[in-house]
Amino acid sequence: MNLQRRWPHIVQEMYHVLESELRRAAEADAGTAHATALRLTTAICDHIGGTLIYIPKGGAVRRSMRDALIRKQCHTHSIEQLARKYQLTQIRIRQILATQE
């Protein structure tokens, strides 16, 4: 019996995303990706299950990660270098550096 079919839809989606990314990123075989995705899915459910959470869209998370890298690299790179590297304007780099998380 396929246990995932009994899971709520959002948990099924989470499992499928994890399995797909594991197979793609690690070039893992189907069995390893499946087992790891099951373990990660249940760990996430154990940790945050029963709570109402908001998960931002991927673009917002990627921008936040990019901005953190920019802040970290500002000590070793000029604003002009960062702007070129991240394909942003120098004004946008200054705005990112002005905000502290």
Image: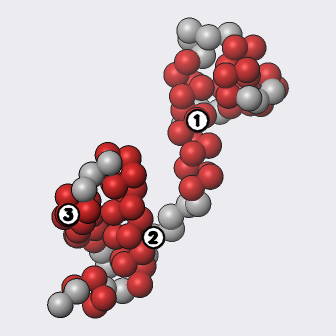
Is residue 16 among the parts visible in the rendering? yes
Percent of width and height locating residue 73: 55, 18
Q: How is the image coloured?
A: secondary structure
Label 3 vs label 1, nearer the camera: 3
Q: Residue at x 22, y 86 (%)?
A: 2
Whether residue 57 is situated above or below residue 85 in the rendered picture = below
Label 3 vs label 2, nearer the camera: 3
In this view, the residue in front, 16 or 48, is 16
Whether residue 96 is situated above or below residue 2 in the rendered picture = above
* Earlier-in-chain disc, 2 versus 1: 2
* Earlier-in-chain disc, 3 versus 1: 3
The image quadrant of residue 18 is: bottom left
Q: Which residue is mark 1?
A: 66
Q: Which residue is mark 2?
A: 53
For numbered disc 3, what is the local secondary structure?
A: helix
Is there a contact, CB below 8 Å, between mark 3 and mark 2?
no
